[in-house]
Image (cartoon, rainbow, N blue to C red):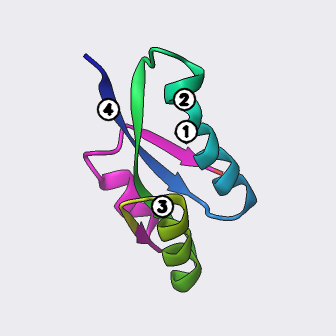
Amino acid sequence: MEKNLGIGMIGYSFMGKAHTNAFKKIPYIFFPPPAIPVLRGICGRNLEKVKEAAKRFGYQYSTTKWQDIVDDPKIQILDNN
């Protein structure tokens, strides 16, 4: 049975995009995958830009408060870049 791991990303610029891309590729690079990354939340300082990044990258929600990412019980991996 595959396990889901919630991903929380702090940062949406170049490295946020690069790390998100890496998480998305885990299921076919490592087959069968040890876990399926679920893009849960993304955080950034600029509200409009982080909303756009969430939509473009496939995150379930966006926020400007890092505490929302840290406090989310559905996030098991926090990526701070």
3 or 1: mark nearer the eye: 1
Please tell me which of labels 3 and 1 falls first in the chain: 1
Q: Which residue is mark 1?
A: 23
Q: Secondary structure at mark 1?
A: helix
Which residue is rendered at x = 34% and y = 44% of the image? 75
Q: Which residue is mark 2?
A: 26
Callout 2 crowding tier (Cα within 10 Å): few <14, some 14–19, many ≥20? some
Q: Is residue 79 magenta?
A: yes
Q: Which disc number belongs to residue 4? A: 4
CB-based contact (under 8 Å), mark 4 and mark 2: no
Query: Mark 4 is on which residue type?
Result: Asn
Q: Is residue 69 magenta?
A: yes
Q: Is residue 68 left or right of residue 29?
A: left
Residue 56: percent from the left, percent from the top? Answer: 54, 67
Please tell me which of labels 4 and 2 falls first in the chain: 4
From this view, report whether residue 72 is shown above or below residue 23. below
Query: Mark 2 is on which residue type?
Result: Ile
Which residue is rendered at x = 54% and y = 85% of the image? 48
- The quadrant the N terminus occupies is top left
Q: Secondary structure at mark 4?
A: strand
Which residue is rendered at x = 64% and y = 55% of the image? 16
What is the span of residues highlighted in magenta in the rendered image? 62-80
Q: Secondary structure at mark 2?
A: helix
Q: Is residue 56 left or right of residue 72?
A: right
